[in-house]
Image (cartoon, helix red, strand yellow):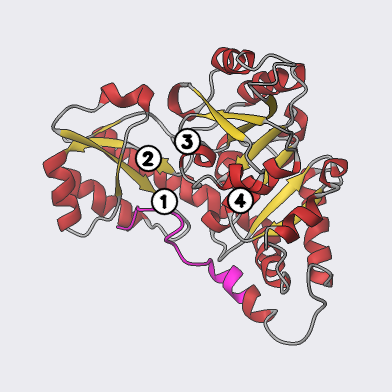
Amino acid sequence: MIFTSDNWAGAHPAIAASLSAHSTGFAPAYGASDLDRKVEQTFNDIFGQEVAVFFVGTGTAANSLALSAINRPGGVSFCHREAHVIADECGAPEFFSHGSRLVPVDGPEGKMNPASLEAEIARFPEGFVHAGQPMAITLTQATESGTVYTPDEIRAISAIAKAHGLPLHMDGARFANALVALNLTPAQMTAELGVDIVSFGGTKNGCWCAEALVFLDPAMASQTPFIRKRAAHLFSKSRFIAAQFDAYFEDGLWLDIARHANAMAARLQSGITSSDNARLAWQSPANETFPIVPKDLAKQLAAKGAMFYEWSPPRSAAHLVGPEETMLRLVTSFATTQDHVDQFVDLLG
């Protein structure tokens, strides 16, 4: 019953096999191998257009280098208050973009409220040198609350970005989970809605260590080869990231993995809803579930082998948790089974 994080799960067997298959022999380094080129073309195919792809080792690197590539002097990027980029990356985006800032935007269930976003942007009037200047908007899909932005919600944020001349970045650490929850294609969830740059995550969805920075307009990426090299994320043996993505995309494996993780989360949520001792903070269509339970029950669950994180509720949801209660975060993955879920639900009572 390990629900701590999808980062705790190992590599999917097909991805591990691909790594093994490509571990022998010789191949050109630094992204020049045939396998690298094959996977780059696969990215073109799944996004339905030519894109610029840069493999990196972590989601933090992808997010940081995305913002670094579009940095402005005194730059300010806008994100949700609980977004990973501002809450969990130790200042890396600011560090790699040489002192740009992240400004938090409020909104329920992990999603930026468009009116709040407009209000925050208005605090940086054009030409007012002391405040700095807006440089980007970044949204997380799926969000840190396990929710997903709908196409209309992305379109509304994109319209604000375009009105202010700002690139729109999508942190897609759980890109596949959001994609299958919405039943969209990659293009329908990004380019067709006005997204410019995607941090495309594979690690949380069954890969060993595979992330990609994807520019939907290759012209925006002209300096990124140098930015990535300077940031020490140009892997010499990048074929091993490519090998993971090669298996990941084969026969739609990446979507099947995400569907399974989401289905296990839905099973958890159904069980929690039926419990007399727990309740859901909100419904989550992706692979993160947030129940509220008595503190004593959380201790009992842990003592009986369940693993999870007790979670600080988002500011907008703090009122949901009573003084003798705690919020849990339960994350499912390709390795989660129905037995894991059902055993946990049985322990809830």
- Cα–Cα span, label 2 and label 4: 19 Å
Are dots 3 and 1 in contact, CB under 8 Å?
no
Residue 143 horizontal/vertical position (percent) = 51, 36
Residue under pointer 2: 289
Which amino acid, by three-letter code, is at mark 4?
Leu
Neighbour class for label 2 at 10 Å: few (<14), some, many (≥20)? many
Up-down relation of residue 292 to residue 252 (above or below): above
Are dots 2 and 3 in contact, CB under 8 Å?
no
Residue under pointer 3: 285
- Cα–Cα span, label 4 and label 3: 15 Å
Residue at the image point whose x is 68% and y is 54% from the top: 212
Residue 149 horizontal/vertical position (percent) = 57, 29
Q: Is residue 9 magenta?
A: yes
Work out whether residue 276 can be spotted.
no
Circle 2 — which element? strand
The single residue placed furthest to the bottom in the displayed view is 25
* Mark closer to the observer (2, 4): 2
- Cα–Cα span, label 2 and label 1: 8 Å
Instruction: Find residue 339 and report its image quarter.
Output: bottom left
In the image, 106 versus 334, the foreground residue is 106
Going from N to C along the chain, the mark reached first, 3 or 1, is 3
Which amino acid, by three-letter code, is at mark 2?
Thr
Circle 4 — which element? helix
Which amino acid, by three-letter code, is at mark 3?
Pro
Q: Main secondary structure of the magenta part?
A: loop
Q: In the image, which disc is placed on residue 301?
A: none
Residue under pointer 1: 332
Residue under pointer 4: 255
Which amino acid, by three-letter code, is at mark 1?
Thr
Specify the quadrant that holds the N terminus.
bottom left
Residue 52 horizontal/vertical position (percent) = 82, 50
Residues in magenta, as a range: 1-17
